[in-house]
Amino acid sequence: MHSPSLSGTSQADCYRPLFLPTVLIGDSNLGGISSTISSYESLLLRGYIIDAVLLFREDYYRNWEYLEQYFAEKSVHLFAVDPPPLRLSDPSADQASTQQYYDNLIRNITPSGINAALDHLDRCHSKRIEELVSMPKRTLGTIWWPFVQHGLSQSEKDVTVIDSAHSDFFSVYRPQENKVKSLLTPEFDGSASWWTQTVGHAHPSLALAAARASGRYGHVMFPQATHRPALNLAERLVQDGPGKGWASRAFYSDNGSTGMEVAVKMALRAYCVRNNVGEEKKHLGVLGLNGSYHGDTIGAMDACAEGVYSCEWHEAKGFWFDPPSVGIANGHPGITLPPELSALVGENVTSVSSLSWVYDVESRLRSPLAKTYHTYIQDKLKFLQIQGQKFGALVLEPLVMGAGGMVFVDPLFQRIMIDVVRSQAGDEQSSGWKGLPVIFDEVFVGLHRIGMESTGPLLGVYPDISVNAKILTGGLVPLAVTLASESIFEAFWGDSKASALLHGHSYTAHAIGCEVANETLKMIQTLKTSQAWKDAQAMWSQVESSKAVWSFWDPGFVDAVSQLPAVKTTMALGSLLAIKLQSDSEAGTSKQSDDGVVFMFCQVTRRCLHRLPLLPCGNTSLTSAIFRLPLAALHLQPIIGLLARLHTS
């Protein structure tokens, strides 16, 4: 079961990508019950479907009697067959004896015979196919999908049936495309399953971590309690992770949106306590950036401007600046300014020498553009104050705004936003946070998605509150952590429960999620020293001087795509690649932008990776490489050539 394959990995891991029907050969000898059950559990942890168990009907230990009942309780059929005869010294006699044994096996028509086993395997196979065939229709009649307009997805061919997933690929049932070949098709998970996958699907280390915590704890309540997985994770994140140097507390929740709900509650309470805010607390808003997305729960939505994700109860509470963005157009990096800033600067796009210069925030603080940003933000806040608007927090998606369109925000603009709000008068004597509590929503960018564990060191400032999720658990189970500074924590300190942070859910700090997160972070630390990471960083060091600017995506590939006529800009950091398409008027052709380039990119990557699911965000298409993906760090000139040929054909 776990004997090493030629590559050195366990055979159970080596054969897992094939996901073939599995027959477990049990052990009929002394200790065989234990070894058979252990093997069964090892296969289950790796996602195998065990269709049957076969073992010899040995009459001394009679293991089959116990195992038959054991597996029957798990709806697995066990077949016990007679053992082969003893080996004879005479070769001819031995051959005859063996042949007689096989003949008897074939003639055996009992319910536990080999023929019955073959019939059972045929039925299992037919049942599996029948289920795959039926799933699209059943799904359309039962499931309510997230982020899908069901009026546009009414056909069974619109349903992607994922039979299994392993490493970087789904195994998808698409019979209409495979009339001759296998019913199952491998599809590359180009969005890393909504940006959650870190080390690939069904990684055995994460499955074992989940099983370890499940077996030890299951789920245990958390108020005034602790357990090792939660404590270890909190200490890791606060003392040696994204909270290092500023955070003192970790609060657990179940996903990024609720993690942001908690963050906003923390910030607004801290602001109200320090400033003795009374009834006006109900009318406090937040400052942020237009196009931000912090989740789908009501409070998280209220911290965003009106947009496509808003609902009937949404009430935008705050003000959101239009952000300047970074991108590569026609092979040249630049900063695109929104209209108000463009009018002040006198140009729509500011050309820059390199991405390294863009992300050298400390040096840019002395630039003319920094002065313009500072004046613009300060004047706007004064204007809003005169209008009577009051704010209780600054909420940012640092460096990249994810679901709002994969906008790579000019880091200098975000740094100056923080500097301006923290320089506001009124709390010079207070320790801890200044001006307004600053929240970093790092649900999308955090934990090395864009090549850095946290964005604070690059921006040169740290938040008062931050949120991590998605990558945190390697894509296996949901979990979020809201980190906070001590001064934020102290705003909830008191002798009345009413002043505590009264937020939580039944599965707060669930041990399975915390243990998986600990294992994920451990694996990421190993990946950071891997050759694939070093090669990708070395590749980008040839074109960029800053160690902070690098990607798994080949810089030549990113540059070449940016020069396609239908592409407005490209941008890559860490595992993330975003391609912003021209609008119809900019591209000069109808529908070329949204459909044409995405089609070309899918066609090219389909040839190289079978199929690449892309996630469109407005007029931006993106893909996120799974961290350990070797291909993402390879030279992609063949793909560039195919893109060029597809575009001109």
Image (cartoon, rainbow, N blue to C red):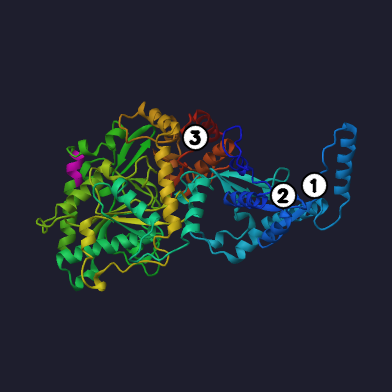
Along the line of sight, which residue is nearer the eye, 364 or 567? Answer: 364
- Between disc 1 and disc 3, the foreground one is 1
Callout 1 touching callout 2 (CB < 8 Å): yes
Q: Main secondary structure of the magenta part?
A: helix
C-alpha separation, residue under disc 3 versus residue under disc 2: 43 Å
Q: Is residue 438 magenta?
A: no
The residue singled out by tag 1 in the image is: 83
Disc 1, disc 3: CB below 8 Å? Answer: no
Measuring 33% from the left and 62% from the top, which residue is drawn there?
A: 261
* Residue under pointer 2: 28
Counting from the top left corner in percent of width and height, residue 626 is at 47, 42
Mark found first going from the N terminus, 1 or 3: 1
Residue 214, position in %: x, y?
49, 58
* Residue at the far top in the pictured view: 542
How dense is the environment of label 3, judged by Cα within 10 Å: few (below 14), some, or many (20 and up)? some
x then y, percent, for residue 373: 20, 46
Residue drawn at x 28%, y 64% is 265
Q: Position of residue 95 (x, y in %)?
A: 87, 36
Amino acid type at image mark 2? Ser
The segment highlighted magenta reads 368-373
